[in-house]
Image: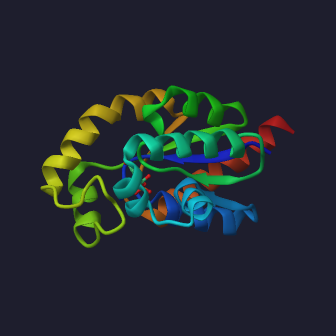
Amino acid sequence: MKNIVLIGMMGSGKSSVGKRLAHNLDRPFVDTDSLIEQRESRSIPEIFELYGENYFRKLERDIVREISESDNLVIATGGGIVINSENVHNLKQRGEVFYLRNGIDALEKRLSENTEGRPLLNGQELRATLEKLLEKRESLYIESADRVIDNDDLEATVNLIKRLVNEEMEESS
Ligand code: S3P
């Protein structure tokens, strides 16, 4: 079965949705940020601080290359995965890509409770930073996605993706 790939901004709930989906569909769950942390034995903020964003993006690219060889996974990606078109190309090889779309208000609300672990937000004015990132990335998310999911409620998002994936499986069988 094709991978289910979740893309979207920081704070869009990719990991929470992904874990629940994987559990419900009985599939393995992977998270690109966690794989990077495991490989480096360092947290994402440490990697940014010690080696910089470009280094992190290379690690991200390598991890995407590797996991794109598998199938049947539920994959939560880092918010910047779409910056590199190679990542999108690789993820789409064996995956269906879902953009979890949220407006600025919802992202700000979720992230204001916790920006820790997100070096691009640290010490920055949250709303202005999110606006800038979303402006740069929104079109990339939309172009990269097979489906855009308006992600107002995590549980509803999980159920919708589950239904879409099951429908597609029935159609192809
Ligand atoms: C980033 C998002 C983070 C993480 C890194 C960079 C981004 O992942 O990959 O801090 O560029 O948007 P989450 O989207 O899981 O927070």
Q: Residue 152: x, y in percent?
A: 36, 57
Counting from the top left corner in percent of width and height, residue 153 is at 40, 62
**Residue in the image at 29% along x and 71% along y:** 114
Determine if residue 151 is in view. no
Name above or below for residue 166 compared with residue 97.
below
Q: Quadrant of residue 124?
A: bottom left
Q: Residue at x 72, y 53 (%)?
A: 73
Q: Position of residue 99 (x, y in %)?
A: 47, 42
The quarter in which the C terminus is drawn is top right
Q: Is 117 or 165 nearer to us in this picture?
A: 117
- As drawn, 113 above or below 130: below
* Residue in the image at 37% along x and 62% along y: 45
* Residue 33 in sight: yes
Please state which of residues 147 and 74 is positioned toward the viewer in this rendering.
74
Horizontal side of 107 relative to 152 (left or right) equals: left
58 sits left or right of 80 in the view: right
Q: Nearer the viewer, residue 46 or 169?
A: 46
Q: Quadrant of the N terminus?
A: top right
Determine which quarter of the picture holds residue 94: top right
- Residue that extends furthest to the bottom in the rendered view of this protein: 113
Quarter location, residue 117: bottom left
Percent x, y of residue 19: 59, 66
